Image (cartoon, grey):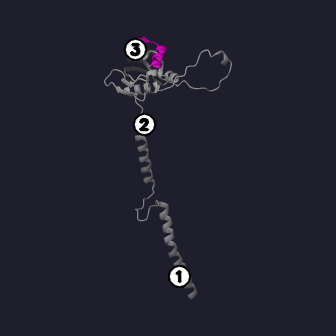
Amino acid sequence: MVLVARSALSIASLALLAQPSRLALASSTTSLSLPLGAPTAQCTLPALSRAFAAMSDLTSSTAPAHPAPSTPEFLQERLAALLASPHIHFPNPPPPALRGIRMGHGPVDLFSTRFANWFAQDVRGVVGGREVDREGLKEALLALQRKWDGGSARFVPREGAEKPATKLLWTQRGTGNQAEIQAAAEFKEEGGTPRISHLTLDGDPSLFSS
């Protein structure tokens, strides 16, 4: 009888010793590890849901917003990017020495690519008081690019206008002279994207000629 009593007492003691370990293990699986003395944060499903919702709100609030096509800011964005795009002239037809030779991938004419993507196929314009077709508008913008300096440029949107309009001011490349033009555009949907269907550029005619 004495032996049975001692065995029962030993088993009870071992059970009491194991209980804190089980409690500690359970606590560690339901809480985050924090410095000593800090309050314990319960890692529950509602808490995780709130954390992810807060992260989603923060991401959406900091994402860059693109201006609508009906705003002067959209026109400014298009003109600034186009005038900053390098233009590469490819001779057509190629020189005799290069005919029949496969050159592979070469440089990209970014100006012509963006002009093709951002301007409607039937785009028209008025440049320095003169009406131009698509090709004439492209040549005028190329001439303007040679005098353009994006580092000194600033845009002043014209609020309250019937169509997106803005003023461009900059210091001409090479001469250092101050330049100013007015730009106004009309947009239409073509190929699933907004494209410039008419562009008016008012200013010194010499800015639009080579």
- Residue at image mark 3: 205
Q: Amino acid at mark 2?
A: Pro
Q: Position of residue 20 (x, y in %)?
A: 49, 71
Tell me which numbered mark, 2 or 3, is placed earlier along the sequence. 2
Q: In the current view of this chain or complex, which residue is farthest to the bottom?
A: 2
| Residue name at image x 51 percent, y 75 percent | 17
Look at mark 1 in the image and give the residue it sits on.
9
Query: Mark 2 highlights which residue?
Result: 64
Q: Nearer the viewer, mark 2 or mark 1?
A: 2
- Foreground residue among 156 and 9: 156
Q: Looking at numbered disc 3 in the image, what kind of residue is underneath it? A: Pro
- Given this view, does label 2 or label 3 mark the residue nearer the observer? 3
What are the residue bounds of the magenta stretch? 127-143
Disc 1 from disc 3: Cα separation? 106 Å
Locate residue 7, reporting x and y percent: 56, 82
Q: Secondary structure at mark 1?
A: helix
| Residue visible at 37% across and 24% down in the picture | 169
Whether residue 106 can be seen here: yes
10 magenta-colored: no
Q: Secondary structure at mark 3?
A: helix
Of discs 1 and 3, which sits in the foreground? 3
